[in-house]
Amino acid sequence: MSVRGTMRNIDGRMRQRRGIASAISCEGIGLHTGLNIRLRFLPSEPGSGILFHRTDLGVVISARYEYVVESRLCTTIGDPTQSGASVATIEHLMAALSGLGIDDVVIEIDGPEVPILDGSAAEFVFLLRCAGIVETDAPMQIIEVLKTIRVVEGMASAELCPSEVGGAGLTVSLSIDFPDKVIGRQELSLQLDDMTFVTELARARTFARVGDIETARAAGLARGGSLANAVVVDGGNVLNREGLRWDNEFVRHKLLDVVGDLALAGAPIHGRFVGTRTGHRLNNLLLHALFADNANYRAVSWAPVSALAAVA
């Protein structure tokens, strides 16, 4: 379902499509693989979307929910036709792109996992801003939620609802509950925009409990994890010398993960997200449920007034 319009006629919900102005790169350790990996952002053709290019394999994978092949401890996308052609731990990078409203970029990567950097999205935000964010005249689209969609696993749930009357953009609300005293029960709700993402979520780091680290390493994961790229919790204590960036950094990071996982919808979602103890798997199942029925959403697409004038 698609509804066309102009930048001026749908209650201020629209913005122009965005890409980056120049190439920029970084390198770092993969959280789970422990490998040193080089990543490079490249400007791409307007309208092409977000693409991961495994330069070591010559494979290009679109950052879309239907290409998620693993969601244990991180979100991994892959090419279903080629064994081993995947990119793991994309959620923080996807959150940075979504938070800044970047729609088109090629991400070259020479290994199987996005570098974890400091465990948050802040360094990706810095790199993308240094590359320069530009607006283009390519057609833009949003996904407007029309019906409440809910998925549940045990005590965890995630749902997408239509926006409140007069609302626009994406509102996110999340509650988490851990037995560790330093985490406990935390809740946070935000109306997302570029500035709110940067100031309230981007710097929130991934976290792990000591017991979970031991389990993950026994499964061959978390090989690159350290106090430099994760908050580590041991009961009532945070083991990082510098402490927390916010008292509720834990729920902020979980919301950052939600933003990154929902970015795999392929277009900005306009509606309300409400989650309880949700994780990568449930977030992906929510997108599958949303797109399973055309009655659940409306794809609103348009071209900027300048582009329409040029065609005329």
Image (cartoon, rainbow, N blue to C red):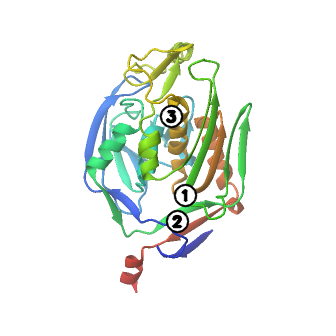
For image coordinates 62% across by 65% down, the residue present is 166
Name which of mark 1 and mark 2 comes first in the sequence: 2
Task: Specify the amino acid type for callout 3.
Answer: His
Name which of mark 2 and mark 3 comes first in the sequence: 2
> In this orientation, which residue lies closer to the viewer: 12 or 295?
12
Where residue 90 appears, as percent x and y from the top left, is 45, 39
Where residue 203 appears, as percent x and y from the top left, is 41, 36
Look at the picture and state if 281 lies above or below 139: above
Q: Residues within 10 Å of mark 2 (few under 14, many from 20)?
A: few
Q: Residues within 10 Å of mark 3 (few under 14, many from 20)?
A: many
Q: Which residue is mark 1?
A: 169
For image coordinates 26% across by 47% down, the residue present is 130
Contact check, label 1 and label 2, Cβ < 8 Å: yes
Contact check, label 2 and label 3, Cβ < 8 Å: no
Task: Specify the amino acid type for callout 2.
Answer: Arg
For image coordinates 37% across by 78% down, the residue present is 306
Disc 1 and disc 2: Cα gap in Å? 7 Å
- Residue 253 numbered tag: 3
Q: Secondary structure at mark 3?
A: helix
